[in-house]
Image (tube, grey):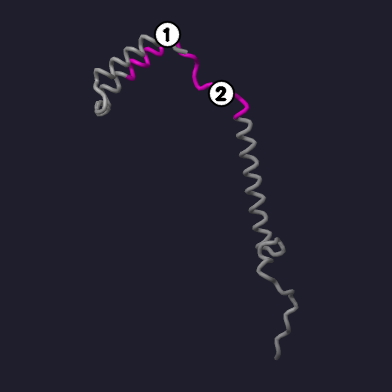
Amino acid sequence: MRPEPCTAAPMSIHGLFDGSTPMGAFRHSQKSIKRGLLKNILVLLTVLLCFPVSAQENLTASQWREDLRFLQNTVHEDYPFLFVKTTEEIFDAEVERLYRNIPDLE
């Protein structure tokens, strides 16, 4: 018994990528999903950038000073290794200078 000849049209390698085969259709659906996702991300970023968001309220001079003292104490207690290139005295003098100038800063 003799096998019957194949009647299917010959397929080239390009058929895999042009959507004429199931694999090509799969690739097209992947591209459309990626485009849709990218479009959604861009729309979301645009919306987020259009609305200003304030992370915190304006601080008073006394609140800034309180934060500066907290920073100064934290550096002395928890990070003494930072005093390699500058001394504790120079650091404290600069903190005091900043502390005095806080009301005049914007």
In the image, taking residue 37 as reference, residue 89 lies left or right, namely: left
Judge by depth and name the residue closer to the eye, 101 or 38.
101
Judge by depth and name the residue closer to the eye, 15 or 97.
97
In the image, taking residue 41 as reference, residue 20 lies left or right, namely: right
Magenta stretch? 49-71
Up-down relation of residue 62 to residue 10 (above or below): above
| Residue at screen point 65% across, 52% down | 31
Q: Position of residue 29 (x, y in %)?
A: 67, 54
User: What amino acid type is highlighted by mark number 2?
Assistant: Val
**Which disc is residue 93 wearing?**
none
Q: Secondary structure at mark 1?
A: helix
| Residue at screen point 69% across, 64% down | 21
Q: Earlier in the sequence, mark 1 or mark 2?
A: 2
Residue identified by numbered label 2: 53
| Residue at screen point 29% across, 15% down | 93
Residue identified by numbered label 1: 103
Judge by depth and name the residue closer to the eye, 37 or 93.
93
